Structures are given as C-alpha cells and as structure tokens.
Image: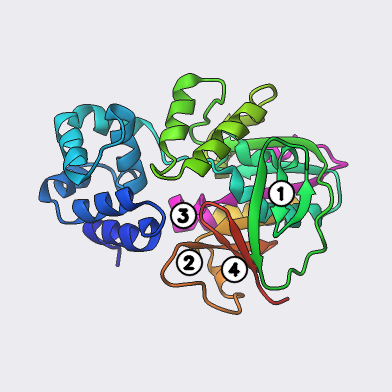
Amino acid sequence: MEPTIAEEYRRFASREARGASPLYEELASGVAGDRDLIALLYGLPPAKRQPNLLFAAARYVAGTPADYQGFRRTVLDHRDAVVATMLSRRTQTNEPARCAALYPLLASLPQPLALLEAGASAGLCLLPDRYGYDYDGRLAGAVDSPLRLRCRTEGGSRFAEPGAVSVAWRAGIDLNPLDVNDPDDVRWLRTLVWPEQHDRLRRLDTAIDLARPDPPRVVRGDLNARLAEVAAEAPADATLVVYHTAVLYYVPDAGRAAFVAQVGRLGGHWISQEDPGVLPSVDARLGERPPADVVTYALALDGRPVAFSAMHGGWVRWLPA
C-alpha cells in the first residue's frame, strides 16, 4: 500500500533530513501535521508531491525560511507561484560527489569508455574524469582538479586501486535537461542543495565551473524512448557504460523492467545506484540489508551488488565478493 502524504513527509524527516538538515526535518514534520498543506499537495499529481520539490520550490520563490511558520506563510501567501514552480520543475539533484562511488567501477572496465547517464540533469555526473578523489587518503582521478571528492570507505573493495578513467564519448538523457550556462537553471540546481549543506553547495559550484567550458550533451526525452537511439551514437571502439543514480525511483515498475531489459540488449555494462526496493533483481542478490534509519543506495555492476553508498556521496561500504 502506498504511504499517505503525511507518512511520506514523516519518513523524510526521520530517515533523510535528520542529522543532515535540521530545517528540512522541521519543515517535513510540520507539513505532516498541517491540513492546509496536505490539502495543497493532494491537489498536485502524485509525482509532484515530494518533500524535496516542495521545499526547493518555496525557497526558489521566496528564499530560505527561518522556521516552519515562515515556510508555511511563504507557501500559502505565494501559493500560485510555488505550485507553478513545482509543476514546471523536477527534483533534479545533480550531486557530483556520487561519482566517488562510481569511479572505482568505471576504472575497472576496459578503457576508453562511452558514458551514457539516464536522468542526467545538468550532466555533472557525466564528468567523473574531471574530478579528483580521496579515498581515506588514497588519491585517484584528476588529482590536480579544483574539485576533490572525499569518500570514506568501509569493507574490502573487490576492485583494485582505481587507475585512470578515459572517456571517449559521453551523453545523458533527461526529461528536462538543465543547462550549466543558463542562470535560471543554475539557480534551481543551487536551490536543490539542502540549506545547511554549505560543502555540497561549494562542490556544486565548482563542478558547474568545470562543466561550463565544455558541457556534456544531455538529450531531452524519456529514458526508455531514447536509450537505444542515444546508445547507438557511442563509438564502437569504446566500452559502453549505462548508469544512473536515484532515477528509477521515479519510473513506474513496468518502465523499470523495460529499461533493465533494454540495457541488457545493448551489450555494454550497467551501473545502478538506487534505493533498495527499486530493482528487485539487484535486491535479490544483496547479501545483507542496508541500514534502516538512513537512506542508502545499493551500488551494482551489471546487476551484481558491490556496495552500499551514501545519498549525497561521502562514503561507500563495500560488500563481500
């Protein structure tokens, strides 16, 4: 049974925001018990009711509130503008730190690579070769890059110390691609970063600066409708890698199954980084359950789980081989 809106907001407060954003924890808890805002959300399509979208839309319209009462006034006083933003925008968090979990897997594959990201947003996770990485003091990637992504690791990795990643071709697919050279799109990307997370905002700004001179191509469209077409553009002498992070959660079950089947027919490799429960075939091969009190992704290569990873980057827990 699908959770009610109030249950979804309580879950967001306790599992996602707690310990990560005191303001968002307060806002989510407040919405869960607010009849007026629950009624507003029920008037929206189900895909437009997420906490991240509501909170970002309110901040986009009127800035970051000091507390729940300020947030509530913003939403009710600027109802039309907030709703319009929620209907026209999407939750397109483009967190480059997620590349730290992807990089060892990418480095383990035959080089050079042809990268195809589903749900690419502005394409910042299509640039893993432009970032540096620090795995508990062990450096990898572009070590002289202005963006160094620090990642705490747990467990023994089945992958060797990651070497260089060479990218021959890259492209993304998104329902609404964002442009790193469009000020309004950049403002939306920055608004999607949670209020107290200043390090994330600095990471985002640095990644945008790195992307601007030569941004990756992100085509507009449904991932199932465009996947085969875009993949066919990849050079034959490069290793095709299709990957995605926190994307299939927004796709209905039938669409997820169709996507997995399509990826299997492409003949390349597949990296998924999704909430457990999104891909039953990956879940069935997990040797252990993820933490129950925090959102954790299951990282898998070609359908085989290899690690749990953090929602916004920062740590990877490798699973036994």
In the rendered image, the residue lying farthest to the bottom is 287
Mark 3: few/some/many CA within 10 Å (<14, 14-19, 20+): some
Amino acid at pointer 4: Val
Give the residue number, with chain letter if any, for mark 1.
133
- Image depth: mark 1 or mark 4 in front: 1
Spatial CA distance of label 1 from label 3 is 27 Å
Spatial CA distance of label 4 from label 3 is 14 Å
Disc marking residue 277: 2
The kind of secondary structure element at disc 4 is helix
Question: Is the residue under label 4 in contact with that under label 1 (CB below 8 Å)?
Answer: no
Above/below status of 301 relative to 224: below
Judge left or right: residue 112 versus residue 171. Answer: right
Q: Quadrant of the N terminus?
A: bottom left
Give the residue number, with chain letter if any, for mark 4.
282
Q: Position of residue 213 (x, y in %)?
A: 68, 21
Spatial CA distance of label 1 from label 2 is 29 Å
Spatial CA distance of label 2 from label 3 is 9 Å
Amino acid at pointer 2: Gly
Mark 4: few/some/many CA within 10 Å (<14, 14-19, 20+): many
The mark that comes first in sequence, 2 or 3, is: 3
